[in-house]
Amino acid sequence: MRRVLCANEVSAVFPMPEEPPVTAIFTMSPPERRPSGPSADLLLDYRERRELEALEREAVKRQEHAEQSAAQNSADTRIRAWERLHQLRMPSIPLHPVLEVIAAATQLSLAEVHDEQRIRAARRASANV
């Protein structure tokens, strides 16, 4: 008969090796110890590319934050921006607690959020006919 080991017993039998802290991967060497030559150029290009990508992601996120609360945008546009930013869909339940969060983040009233819910429900109903 085989016995199943619990997590504590497994770690006692098969200890996990100590892993270096993740920050050690991203630390920079002093200039005199940095690699030079073509491989160093590739490494710098990669780091620069990663930094530019991070800056672009941050700019997009700032733009989406601004879009979700911009007064010139419709309630639909603001709520869709909130949905993209949080990668969530607005719930269809009228009393869902996250609706208050959506209203605050989009600077809409709860009534406007409920109106948008009703509009979306009507669209879904007409699409199903």
Image (cartoon, rainbow, N blue to C red):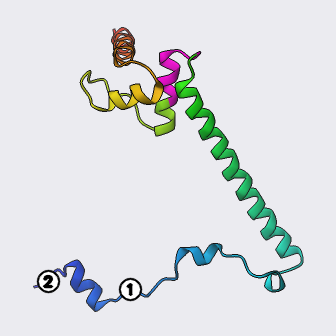
Question: Which of the labelled discs sits on residue 86, or is there none?
Answer: none
- Report x, y in % for residue 19: 48, 83
**Real-space Cα distance between discs 2 and 1?**
21 Å
State the residue at coordinates (64%, 39%): 60
Relative placement, left or right, of 2 versus 42 is left
The image's mark for residue 16 is: 1
Q: Residue furthest left?
A: 1
Judge whether 42 appears above or below 84 on screen.
below
Residue drawn at (71%, 58%) of the image: 50
Q: 12 or 129: which is nearer to us?
A: 12
- At x 40%, y 25%, the residue is 103
Contact between marks 2 and 1 (CB within 8 A): the answer is: no
Q: How many marks?
A: 2
- In this view, the mark in front (2 or 1): 1
Q: Is residue 96 left or right of residue 72?
A: left
In the rendered view of the protein, which quadrant contains the C terminus? Answer: top left
The residue range painted magenta reads 72-81
What secondary structure predominates along the stretch shown in magenta? helix
Is residue 74 rendered magenta in the image?
yes
Residue 15 falls in which quadrant of the image?
bottom left
Counting from the top left corner in percent of width and height, residue 43 is at 78, 70
User: Quarter of the image holding residue 6?
Assistant: bottom left
Q: Residues within 10 Å of mark 1 (few under 14, many from 20)?
A: few
Q: Secondary structure at mark 2?
A: loop
Query: Residue at 83% of width from left, 75% of height from top?
Result: 39
The residue lying toward the viewer, choosing from 71 and 49, is 71
Disc 1, SS: loop
Q: Which residue is mark 2?
A: 3
> Where does residue 48 sit, x and y in percent of width and height?
77, 60
